[in-house]
Structures are given as structure tokens and as C-alpha cells.
Amino acid sequence: MRKKLVVKVLTGMNDPERTAQAFTVAAAAVASGVEVSLWLTGEASEFALPGKADEFSLPKAAPLPGLIAAILAGGSITLCTQCAQRRGITADQLIPGIIIKGAASFVEEIMEDGVQALVY
């Protein structure tokens, strides 16, 4: 049976430990061969923009830009439609490979057989 991990991260600079945990778990899952879909929502939305992950810092945590690159290399990253709209973020501003989708797509993903969803 196929296994897929969907990680929804709502935190950003406001909660660095939880934010780092979400990206670290997603990248570790990709590295172990799990299909991964990371969703950026709420405060995490800004990490869809080039350069924003460079501003994130947490002692003894892996650098966020490297985790994002690892997730994109073996999985997917999606920015929530409403979160993007509230922040004035458009598709042409995103890090290449990140897409924008809405809640219906998130629900569709997490309801598939073999999916484990985590929310940070």
C-alpha cells in the first residue's frame, strides 16, 4: 500500500520551533521515500516567497531554505488560496515549484487511502 504524508503548517516566524518541526518532518519523510505534500497556511504562507525562508533562524535547526529545496525535490509544496489572497501573494511571486490551491484540494488529499495528515 502506498503511503503519503500531508503536512499542514500554520506557523511561521511567530513559532519557530513548531515551524522548524513541520519542515524537518516533511523533509525527513521525503528522504525516507515517503510521498510528501506540504501545505503552507496562515503565518507559514510567507515561506512560499523567495528569500523569506532565509530570514528564519532557530538554533540547532536545519536551515529552512535547504528543507524547502529537499521537499520540492521529492514532494510538493502548496500555498493555501485564501491565505495567499489575504496577503496579496500571487502565483508569479512564488518560489518555482510551489503552487496555490484551495481547501477542497487539501480535503481531497487527506481523504485518500494511505494518507497520514499532520498539522503544525
Image (cartoon, helix red, strand yellow):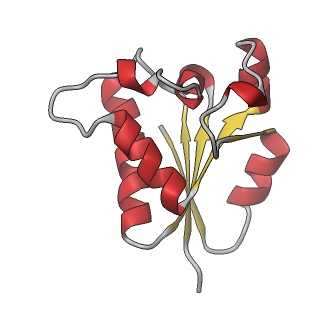
Whole-percent x, y for residue 24 in the image: 35, 47
Is 84 or 17 nearer to us in this picture?
Answer: 84
Q: Residue at 58% across / 30% down in the picture?
A: 48
Q: Is residue 1 above or below residue 27?
A: below
Whole-percent x, y for residue 23 in the image: 41, 43
Q: Residue at 38% across / 45% down in the picture?
A: 67
Q: Residue at 62% across / 30% down in the picture?
A: 41
Look at the image and tell me in which quarter the N terminus lies: bottom right
Q: Is residue 96 left or right of residue 56?
A: right
- Outermost residue, bottom direction? 1
Whole-percent x, y for residue 31 in the image: 37, 65
Q: Residue at 24% across / 25% down in the picture?
A: 58
Total labels: the figure holds 0
Q: Is residue 75 above or below residue 97?
A: below
Is 14 or 117 nearer to us in this picture?
Answer: 14
- Outermost residue, right direction? 104
Q: Is residue 27 above or below residue 59?
A: below
Q: Is residue 89 left or right of residue 57?
A: right
- Outermost residue, left direction? 60
Q: Residue 65's quadrant in the figure? A: top left
Q: Is residue 83 left or right of residue 4?
A: right
